[in-house]
Image (cartoon, rainbow, N blue to C red):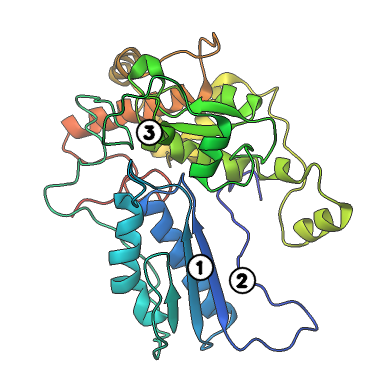
Amino acid sequence: MSEGNPRAETNPIRHHQGAPPPTRALLIHDMAVYENFERCTRRLFERLKDAQRQFPGLPRHLLFTVQGHRGAAGEFDDDALEVMQEFIPTVLREYLTQVATPLYASLPQPQRDDIPDELRIWYPPGQEGAWYDVERLPLRVRETISTDRRTRPTARAIASYLGLDEPTCLICWGSPAECAHVVPAALGGSLDVRNFALLCPAHHRQAPDIADAEAFWAWVDYAEIRDSGSKWISATNDMKAWVRAIGERTEPKDRSGQRFATAVSFELRHLYGWSDVDFATVSWDLIDEYQQVLDAATSKHFGIEKKVSTCAWAYHIAMRRLAKRLGGVPIRPDHPWTGTWPVP
């Protein structure tokens, strides 16, 4: 994974030298708790295109599973249901021979191979602001049913919800893992199990303290790829050699000497999709909006006065607030990792 492209991912479909020729392409995707509908569907689409590029014309079988994404009664949440009930059947199905999800398994059918070059996701008319009202900065949580829970869940309870065998960090797979609020209690976050992540002490200290659960999970997703090298610290030499052979790092990258402003800039570029044009628009008006966002929708944790992740989010939301007043066009709306998407 190169420094300039923190979103580069390992190709999930591989054919090992010396193995018999494949007779089908198996696409496996486990919808992580940090993937919302938009991030999950884009990755499914990329896996589909990868399969066609590497094994053109072979029957493609999709095995789709889900981590977390459960409601108070154990039912799947809206993001998971929309992927399984709408996106897979109506968008992907005709390009697949067979599909299996936790809700259904399909019978084999002929598949199409003329896969489109690009996936475009649009909000329905009138719902373009559904993900977050940047003007009012309301609390945005995943759990939609209030809970009267008075104690935080255990690490094992959170691990069970997340689909993990043991409590380990979602980003680096390290342990021990701490119970990290998604939306901090100081900002109205609840003690519901869905309002917690498992992070090692180092990543817990880096995680944003913001009133937006979806943006928190987007940061975990980003950091999991950014710090992918840290996952292999205790791996065997053979495993490290295999990981390096497919183009991934096997050692963590030391960012301890990075200046604060440089780190914020890096996160704005690689998590929120800012370009040189966006940075050129920075003004006193933006600084004023940024301060308002910090005051209204962020908090402090571990006594840390400033966090890179919190400040980057606040700058991005401040820019969106200014953009909305200037015509309603969000900054970099087509960037695939932010959860903000083109408005028709």
> What's the residue type where badge 3 is placed?
Ala
The residue under label 3 is: 213
In the structure shown, which secondary structural element does the residue marked by tag 1 occupy?
helix
Residue 210 picture location, percent across and down:
39, 24
Q: Closer to the camera, 311 or 139?
A: 139
Residue occupying the far right of the picture: 237
**Label 1 belongs to which residue?**
47
Question: Circles 3 and 2: CB distance less than 8 Å?
Answer: no
Closer-to-camera residue (20/105): 105
Against 83, residue 256 (above or below) is: above
Left or right: 164 with respect to 89? Answer: right
Please report the residue visible at 40 percent of the width from the left and 48 percent of the height from the top: 69
Res. 207 visible in picture: no
- Which residue, given by chain and number where applicable, does mark 2 sit on? 13
Residue at (41% x, 76% y) in the render: 105
Horizontally, is 166 left or right of 238 in the view? Answer: left
Say what secondary structure mark 2 lies in: loop
Looking at this rendering, what residue extends furthest in the bottom direction?
A: 110
Q: Give the label, 3 or 2, closer to the camera.
A: 3
Marks 2,1: beta carbons within 8 A: yes
Q: Position of residue 64 (x, y in %)?
A: 47, 65
Between the C-alphas of marks 3 and 2, the distance is 31 Å
Observer-side mark, 1 or 3, equals 3
Task: Tell me the CA gap for discs 2 and 1.
Answer: 8 Å
Question: How busy is the neighbourhood of tag 2: few (under 14 within 10 Å), some, or many (20 plus)?
Answer: some
Which is more N-terminal, label 3 or label 1? Answer: 1
